[in-house]
């Protein structure tokens, strides 16, 4: 979760860890709650993803992509997750 603690510093730290993970693994899934603190910080941080060559897309894109390649992963079972982060212009396996 990006927001287990509702402080700006904690959410920013989690977001940066998510960015680093996405850069290493080419795909990352983030979970957050609709708390006012989370929405405020993510509204500031999400636009910075392009600076890291990362695109925010719906989780359904990951599902469709994996169906196409017939290599479903365990992350698909978490259907309540609403987004994934993956590097722009990258090839997913």
Image (cartoon, grey):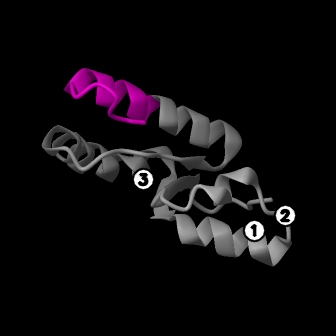
> Any mark on residue 71, and which?
2
Asked whether, in this view, residue 39 is left or right of residue 91, the answer is left
Q: Answer yes or no: do the residues labelled 2 and 1 have beta carbons within 8 Å? A: yes
> Any mark on residue 66, and which?
1
Residue 34 lies, in percent from the top left, at 24, 50
Q: Is residue 3 magenta?
A: yes
Q: CA distance from mark 3 to mark 2?
A: 28 Å
Q: Is residue 8 magenta?
A: yes
Q: CA distance from mark 1 to mark 3?
A: 24 Å
User: Does 40 appear above or below 93?
Assistant: above
Q: Quadrant of the N terminus?
A: top left
Q: Viewer-nearest of labels 3 and 2?
A: 2
Q: Answer yes or no: do the residues labelled 1 and 3 have beta carbons within 8 Å? A: no
| Residue depicted at 45% across the width and 61% down the height | 82
Please give the count of numbered marks on the rendered protein: 3
Q: Quadrant of the C terminus?
A: bottom right
Given residues 77 and 68, the one toward you in this image is 77
The residue at the far right in this view is 70
Given residues 61 and 52, the one toward you in this image is 61
Residue 30 lies, in percent from the top left, at 47, 46
Asked whether, in this view, residue 25 is left or right of residue 29, the answer is right
Give the structural element (helix, strand or loop) at label 2.
loop
Residue 64 lies, in percent from the top left, at 67, 75
| Residue depicted at 66% across the width and 60% down the height | 76
> Any mark on residue 50, and which?
3
Mark 1 or mark 3: which comes first in sequence? Answer: 3
- Mark 1 neighbour class, 10 Å CA radius: few under 14, some 14 to 19, many 20 or more: some
Give the structural element (helix, strand or loop) at label 1.
helix
| Residue depicted at 66% across the width and 48% down the height | 26
Asked whether, in this view, residue 90 is left or right of residue 20, the answer is right
Tell me which segment is drawn in magenta: 1-16
């Amino acid at each position: 979760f990006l927001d287990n603690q509702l402080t700006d510093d904690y959410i920013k730290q989690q977001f940066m860890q998510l960015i680093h993970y996405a850069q290493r693994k080419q795909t990352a899934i983030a979970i957050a709650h609709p708390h006012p603190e989370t929405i405020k910080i993510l509204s500031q941080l999400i636009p910075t993803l392009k600076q890291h060559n990362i695109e925010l897309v719906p989780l359904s894109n990951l599902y469709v992509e994996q169906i196409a390649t017939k290599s479903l992963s365990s992350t698909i079972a978490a259907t309540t997750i609403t987004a994934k982060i993956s590097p722009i212009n990258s090839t997913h396996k």
